[in-house]
Image (tube, rainbow, N blue to C red):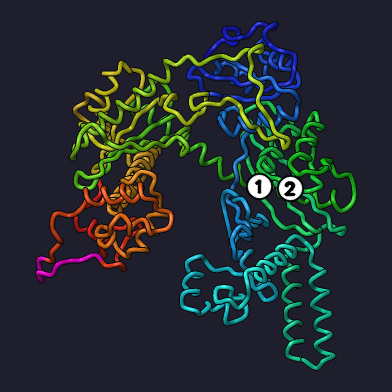
Amino acid sequence: MADPSSYRPKPGEIPDSPGVYRFRDEHRRVIYVGKAKSLRQRLANYFQDLAGLHPRTRSMVTTAASVEWTVVSTEVEALQLEYSWIKEYDPRFNVKYRDDKSYPYLAVTMNEEYPRVQVMRGHKKKGVRYFGPYAHAWAIRDTVDLLLRVFPVRTCSAGVFKNAARTGRPCLLGYIGKCSAPCVDRVSAEEHRELADEFCDFMTGRTNTYIRRLEKQMAEAADEMEYERAARLRDDIGALKKAMEKNAVVLADATDADLIAVAEDELEAAVQIFHVRGGRVRGQRGWVTDKVEEITTGALVEHALQQLYGEETGDAVPKEVLVPALPDPVEPVQEWLAGRRGSGVSLRIPQRGDKKALMETVQRNAQQALVLHKTKRASDLTTRSRALEEIAEALDLDSAPLRIECYDISHLQGDDVVASMVVFEDGLVRKSEYRRFQIKGFAGQDDVRSMHEVITRRFRRYLAEKEKTGEWTDGENAETPEIDRNGEIVGTGLTEDDGRPKKFAYPPQLVVVDGGAPQVAAARRAMDELGIDDIAVCGLAKRLEEVWLPGDDDPVVLPRTSEGLYLLQRVRDEAHRFAISYQRTKRSKRFRSSPLDDVPGLGDTRKQALLKHFGSLKKLRSATIDQICEVPGIGRKTAETIAVALARSAPAAPAVNTATGEIMEEEPGTMGSSGEPVTTGAPDERRGQET
């Protein structure tokens, strides 16, 4: 525990201007990021008598070992820089909302020649229009199924589309009228894009236009006694109305707004967001966070706004955002939102009418989400705490191992030897800090030697990072980031080793290796050679689930019902899974390797062009340089390099089938993506099991 007075800057050093500050711990890891209208006044609040600080603030300043700051021009720039650094450093004492699930979106890929309607999750892609998020993927599919009657947009994958174009036969949806079948040229690319635009317009809330148009067409068809066409239009109108009924009207004035509600207690907070477009609820999502700092409701709202709109632009930011409490001050946040949208944004608290009633509904959802989260977490938190205490007691540790690293070696009969490192913090996985290793010191199968190499490399990096002092930026020399007109940071001076958590600089309290006494001894010997004696080591053997300690002849046997043993098993199994997945990836790449991979500057596109032009690697080997130059994108110098690479890798003799005596030749149909023949079956399973 550090004394804040040991790193407190002199009052005259801190500028009295807007900026963003960072607290770092003894390992130079950023643990808190904050912004201030006046850096001098804000930082002075952290260095008062510890007894007067909030318990969480007191924990932060005593964990920190230094503080630094960056001066900016305005509070809006400070807001954007704070968001960027929280995302960059992932500081442990900042409020970070975590999605309680990965919400699905209805996406229209307008960046493709033939836009496709599909369900998407995860990060948003440029050029794709998103609607939602929805609570369930089936809700999206039900809506799309109804709308395809009227807007028959493509929904098939790229593979299905190409296959239909090759065969000249559309898929089933093309036959039943739920796809316009651009794959077989029933409609042109321009006509199909118009359908996609109309689909998007309908989803954005412009529904009455299309319904009125279809009603007019139905009346005209009936007047002309085209009753079958009129019946189809009647069914189309019914499908659109049914799709609209799935989202009831909540705001009669066709408002576009996002409503944010917060439910909180002393330890946690839950946020619920309703996305209203055209007066209808088009999506809903929820977040939960630990209140690791003293924070007001307005500040929670501000953090929610940063996460919600930090990477959005244009219409994704609505004209109106309704919140339970306003950030203090509200003007920079409102200006930042307007910059993201490109026009004015109203940020306010609803006072009366339908909007206040809807906000009460969102608030009830937030309360229920918090209750449900606490119910689930209560047992989980108790179990994890008990597991860590049992491990500390069984291994005779001074305190519970809040950070555990586990290592595993994987290979296939001595080939493609790799290792994995997984990290658990407070009993939970920390996937952002997982690492993978290739064994470089020797060839062949030797798990003990491999473990020694991996532990040596990992903790040599730790010592190197620990020796780095890092430059402390003071107020006078602080770097002012360049920020563009949209509020985006163009240059911050952030470097790879500037406090990011994704490094080897943060040490564990316990190292677990997958194996018995030999692997444990190798790990301990590697640490002793580096002079590291303050990190505990143990191993977990698979056969009897015994825990081995360095230098002990007998293992520690934990009860089968022990939560501590269960946690060690989870850590070991996760390391095993991660190592095997990496080993399989390397193995598959090796099997798909090609002499063309060694040609510098030759990417996948030109490789495929070469193989498509010649049909096989054998024919490419026999081609002249002039013939290779005939391939689009291949110049003479590149052709010469390709010819040399293929000549070096030419087989000494043809492959022969020992059963029939037949010479095995490469066939175009058996070519892999990199140009080598692909062997069918499962030879890997015949060769042995992964280790």
The residue most toward the front is: 626
Residue at the image point whose x is 10% and y is 71% from the top? 660
In the image, taking residue 170 as reference, residue 78 lies left or right, namely right
Residue tagged by mark 2? 314
Q: Residues within 10 Å of mark 2 (few under 14, many from 20)?
A: few
Q: Residues within 10 Å of mark 1 (few under 14, many from 20)?
A: many
Residue 87 placement (x, y as % from top left): 59, 34
Identify the image quadrant of residue 631.
bottom left
- Residue 499 x, y percent position in the rendering: 52, 24
Q: Residue at x 69, y 69 (%)?
A: 195
**666 lies above or below 314:** below
The amino acid at mark 2 is Gly
Q: Is residue 651 within the magenta segment?
A: no
Mark 2 or mark 1, which has the lower sequence index? 1
- The residue stretch that appears in magenta: 658-666
Q: Quadrant of the C terminus?
A: top left
Residue 318 in the image: x percent, y percent? Answer: 77, 48
Q: Is disc 1 placed on a helix, strand or loop?
A: strand
Asked if the residues shown at circle 2 and circle 1 are in contact, with their CB atoms under 8 angstroms apart, the answer is: no
| Residue located 59% across and 27% down the image | 93
Name the one closer to the observer, 64 or 413: 413
Circle 2: element type: helix
Q: Is residue 427 left or right of residue 517?
A: right
Vertical relation: 534 (above or below) 438: above
Q: Which mark is residue 380?
A: none
Residue beneath label 1, please? Answer: 286
Residue type, mark 1 in image? Gly
2 vs 1, front mark: 2
Most common secondary structure along the magenta stretch:
loop
